[in-house]
Amino acid sequence: MHSLPRFLSILCILSLPLTVMAGELPKVSGQIVRIELPGENRTLALAEVGVFEKGVNLALNQQATQSTVAYSGAATRAVDGKANGDFFNDSVSHTSTEANPWWEVDLGSMANIEAIIVYNRTDSHGQRLDGFTLKVLDAKRQEVFSKKSITASDKVSFLQSGVQPSQVVEAVKSAASGKDLGAIWFIGDSITQSNADGDPQGSPRKSLYDLLKANGYSFSYTGHHARNVDGLPATGASPADNLYHYHSGVSGILIGDATRRGFRTILPTAWRQGRLATVKPDMILIMLGTNDVGHGYDLDNGPQRLRGLLDEIYALPNIGQPKVLLGTIPPNRRIEADRTNVMIFNESVPRIVLDYRAKGHAITMVDQFKAIDAAYEANMRGDNLHPNATGNDTMAKQWFDAIQAAQQSGDTGSGDEAMLFPGKKSDFRGYDRYDRIKTKSGHFSIICPKNPAPGKPWLWRSLFWEAIQQFSNTDLKLVDEGYYVVLAHGDVAGHPRGSANIDAAYALLTEEYGFAKTCSMASMSRGTLSLFRWASENPEKVNSIYVDNGVLNVLSWPAGKLVPGNDSFASGAASSWAGFKKKFGYTTDEEALKTKESPIDLLEPLAKAGVPILSVCGSKDPAVPYEENDAILEERYKALGGEITVIVEDKGHSHGMKDPTPVLEFIRKYSKPQNN
C-alpha cells in the first residue's frame, strides 16, 4: 500500500500494475471528491480513496455514499484505510451493474486539496474502472475541478504543481497493526476439504474463518477449488459469506513424488486454476502426510517428499514471499502402529522448519497433534482419521494461535536481530526463544527462563522441537525453575562428525554466556544416537541422561527385521539403515550388523564418569522394542557399575510421561551446583 502527502489519484487493475501520472492538479479548495463512471452497464468498485492536505488523509473514515450497493460493497469500504484491492478482504466498495454509477466522499469541511489517491480493485475486473471521471466539488456542490476519461491502471496520480513523486508517503492506514493477512491458501487432504458430522458449516477452514473474523483480521481465502467444492450453496448476501470454500484440500491425496501421484503432481496445474490463478497467497497453511502414513507409503522418505513440496512451492512463478505454516498431522489411534507412524512422521517436521528458516524463509511449525490427542475421543470421528466439529475448532485454534504469533513477531524468516542471543527471537508459550544461533559448524536454538537459576543450569536436547512443543510438560517446568533448554543437533545417525556443532554450541554457551560447565541431557527416538555419541566423548560435561523411547540399538532400529540375517522383530526403516551404513562406511549388511556404534556400545566412558541414566520406554513399541533396546542398556550399564533406572510404560512409540515428576526429580537431583 502506498500513500501520498500531496495530490495523487490511484487506480488499480490486475492486468496493468502501473502508476500513471494522469495530470497536474491546480490549486483547488473543495469538500467533496466524486468518482463517476459514464455509460450503460457499468460497475464501480473502489479499494480506497485518499484526499490529502499537508500529508493528512482527510477522507479517512468520512461519510461516503454511492449510487447503489451490491455484494455488501458499501461505499465506506473505500475510506476505511485499507488499500488492499482484493474484494474478498471486505475492503472494496461495489455498486450494481447500472447506468452511470458514482461514488463520493464528503470531507466535512472545505480543504486545500493537494493530493487524491484512488485504489482500484486488483483481484479481478480492474478494467471496469477504465474511463472514469474524477471531480472535486465545493460545499455547495459546485464543480471546481474535473478530469474525464481517465485510463485505468494500478495507480493514477494527480500532483499539484511543485509536488514531486519523491514526496509521496503512506497515504492510508495500512495493516501495520498486523490485522491484514492478505490471501490465505490451505493445502491438505480430506481433513482440509471435508465437513464434520453432517454440519454444513464444519471444517477447520470455516472454524478458522470465524476465529479470524471475530478477532478483527481482514483476509480472504484462495485456492484452486471452486466455491461449491463442499457441495454447499453460495447463497450468502456477499461472496465473502461463502469464501471459506476456496482452498486446495484434496480427499485422499498423498504428498507425492516422481513415482506416486500426490499434491506435488497437481501443484503446477492448481497454481493456474480457480481463484488461485489470480489471487496468489500471502500465507500458506499446509498439512499433508495423513494418507502417506495411512497407506504405509514409503514412510522413511515422507519427510523428503515434504521438503520437495516446499521447494516446488517456493519455486512457483509469482510466489512472492508468503508466510508458511507447516502443520504436523493429527493422531490416529486405530491401531498402535498407526499412532507410532504418525509420531515418527511428525518428528521430522521441526527439523524441516529449522532448515528452511535457515534459508531465509518465513516458515513456522504448527502442532496439530498435541491438542487433538489430549482429548482424542472428543475431537475425532469414529474413523480415527477425521476431526469432528469439536476437532475442527481445536485444529482451527492451533492455526489461529500460530497466525497471531507470526503477525505479532513480524517474522520474515530472514535477518537476525541484535538481542540477548545472536538469533531470531520469538515467543514460545510466554518465554523468549532464539533460533538459528550460529556456530562455525551449524546452529542451535534456546528457550530462556524469565529468571535464570544460579549458575545457569541447562537441559540439552538432541533433535526435534517436537520434544519441547509436543511434550513440554518436563522441559517447561524446568524453564519455570530457571533452566535454559538448548536444542543443538548432532548427526542423525550418531556419526562422530555430528559432534562438532554440539561442541561449538557448548563452547559458546559456557565461555561467552556463563552457562554451567555441565549440562543435563535429554533425547527422544533417533535423537538418542547423537546424544550418546557426544556424551560418551564428553562424559565430564554431563550431569545426567534422560532417554524417552530412545533408539539405543541400531540393529533394532533402523535395521530391524527388514535386514536379512538380523535377529530382530522391530519394524525397521530401510532408508535410514542405508543412511547409517553410508555414513559409517559399511558396504554390506553383513558388515554393518557387526557395528559397535550403537549407544549400548558407548557406555563405558559414561559409567566410569558416574553419569546416571533414566530411560522411559513403551512395552508395546514396534519401532524401538524394550527387549532390544532398554533391556540391553540396563543390563550392560549395571554390569559396568553405572547407575540406571528404566521405567517401562504400557504404551507404544509415544513420548512424554503424563506425570513428569520422576523425570523432574531425576534431573534436579543430579544437576551440579556451578560457580562460573
Image (tube, rainbow, N blue to C red):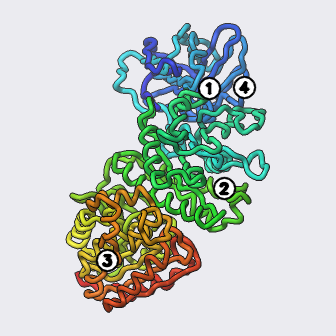
| Kind of residue sitting beneath label 4 | Ala
| Mark in the foreground, 2 or 4 | 2
Regarding residue 58, the answer to whether it shows in the image is no
Q: Nearer the viewer, residue 266 or 594?
A: 594
The disc, 4 or 3, on the residue closer to the chain's N-terminal end is 4
| Kind of residue sitting beneath label 3 | Asp
The disc, 3 or 1, on the residue closer to the chain's N-terminal end is 1
| Mark in the foreground, 2 or 1 | 2
Q: Mark 3 to mark 1: distance in Å?
A: 82 Å
Q: Mark 2 to mark 4: distance in Å?
A: 41 Å
The disc, 2 or 3, on the residue closer to the chain's N-terminal end is 2
Residue bearing mark 3: 601
| Mark in the foreground, 2 or 3 | 3
On screen, residue 407 above or below 127 = below
Q: Mark 1 to mark 4: distance in Å?
A: 21 Å
Disc marking residue 106: 1
In the shown orientation, is residue 531 left or right of residue 390? left
Residue bearing mark 2: 385
| Kind of residue sitting beneath label 2 | Leu
| Kind of residue sitting beneath label 1 | Asp
Q: Are marks 2 and 3 in contact (CB under 8 Å)?
A: no
